[in-house]
Image: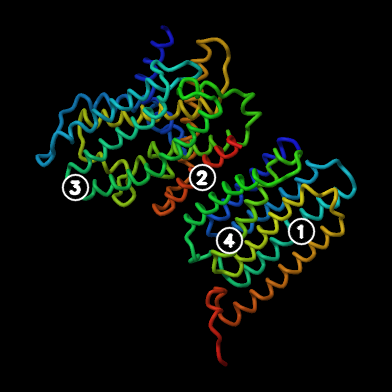
Amino acid sequence: MNSLADQLLVLVMLINLVMLGSSRLIFSIRAVAAQGVILGILPSLVHPLSFHLVAITASIILAKGIVIPYLIGDAVHKAHIRREVEPFIGYLPTLFLGAVCTALAFVFAARLPLAPEHRSLLVVPASIATLLTGFLILTTRRKAISQVIGYLVLENGIFVFGLLLTEAMPFMVEAGALLDLLVGIFVMGIVINQISQEFSTIDTSRLRALKEE
Amino acid sequence: MIDGIIHCLVVLLLPPLLIGIITKTKAAFAGRVGAPLLQPYYDILKLLRKGSVFSTTTTWLFRAGPLVTLAAILTASLLVPLGRHPALISFDGDLILFAYLFGLARFFTASAALDTGSSFEGMGAAREVTFSCLAEPTLFVALITLARISGSLRLSTILTYPTPALWRATGASMLLLVAALFIVLLAENCRIPFDDPTTHLELTMIHEVMVLDHSGPAFGLILYGAALKLLVLGALFTAIALPVSTGSDLADWGLFLASMAALAVAIGVVESVMARLRLVRIPQLLVGATILSAFAMLLVLR
């Protein structure tokens, strides 16, 4: 592992914080796309070059950096929303919580029984911090689209953890995971459209009460 | 000895020029010729020659405000190393004194504003202390991080420790620190995007509104103090952002002056391309800066 990969992981964690603090959906989508592209570049820095690696890099950049952001952007466009209006917890508190989570991720990673060669890397804390950020976005935002973005960040966190295992992980497994993700985003896009057509809002907290026809 | 004399001369003579450079940069961006570079000197000299008007409702606090503020910032300017040269006064833990001298200056400016009894100035004082108590943790965390890197509690050692080699080794955390400190620099000096130093609209002012009742020499001292604060915090910033040394003493002074001028141009560019933030967004940016510096500390500590 070289220092360039570490710098990129720092960037990934910074993007987490940016996403927690921003209210504009389009901006969040671009941030998650940038995070996806960085994650796509990371495996090629960590592991020796091979066909397997090139295929993974290309498919991840294509899926996380282009296709998925395009799909979510499309859903945003169709549902006519620009920003998350009233999150359950405000932006400043979530930003603060995100910082605390990042700090805790470092503490937690230091206590994990990791392989000695993985001990000094930023990979594990970065992945835990990204996972926790994803959880935070998923639980504190009201709009369905923000929750999809949170879900993506969560998946990015899992992917960062997988960096340690890229050689052990067969290509098919990763391709399968990416495909699942893509289908998930696709379905969510359709669901979001349906929600916004039926209820003229995609505020998920209003979906608790049942409606009678 | 010669370094000490140059230090004093730079601290006493340079500050208004920085303001002049910022104004000139903004004028160039707007396509105007702009005021001459030395205009801030003329302004301050003109104000010093004028008489003062003191409101009858004010007490000694109002008169002490500008003096104590300027004295505190002048003391702080003795603690900060300029360029690669150690400061005139330095002892263990002087970084805390350095940070709290700014606190003292702010306290007296705000008290003098409250002393006028104008609700308008009270509003400005409230804003100023709110934003500065959000900016202070950033400065402290950044200084603690640098203290940890350099293993010393003296500002002179801390700020002359960064080198290009250190930048290559801990690039990420240094970059985070520089970003956080730049935000603090803009906030502490009341520049855009936090405060507009040229505005006189009541709803948007922070620092300007606190000094509305001062006139003549007192106001001149306030203007000079604000420029000096920019120099001191700018020296702190450039020591970390541009840690280059030429080896020769005089060339280092030249390098320091050039980097301060570059910083002034950078601030002018920021002021020209950015709009002022809405008041509710300012705490968000300041807390963001604190988080950046805390993150840098986390990377250094592990």
> Tag 2, which secondary structure?
helix
Ranked by sequence position, the earlier of labels 3 and 2 is 3
The residue carrying mark 4 is A137
Q: Amino acid at mark 2?
A: Ile
The alpha-carbon separation of the residues under discs 3 and 2 comes to 36 Å
Q: How many marks?
A: 4
Q: Amino acid at mark 4?
A: Ile
> Tag 3, which secondary structure?
loop
The residue carrying mark 2 is B291
Expressed as whole percent of the image width and height from the top left, the position of residue A98 reads: 55, 53
Q: Amino acid at mark 3?
A: Ser
Q: Nearer the viewer, residue A138 or A128?
A: A128
The residue carrying mark 3 is B118
Ranked by sequence position, the earlier of labels 4 and 1 is 1
Identify the residue at horizontal 30%, vertical 27% (top origin).
B72
Expressed as whole percent of the image width and height from the top left, the position of residue B289 reads: 49, 43
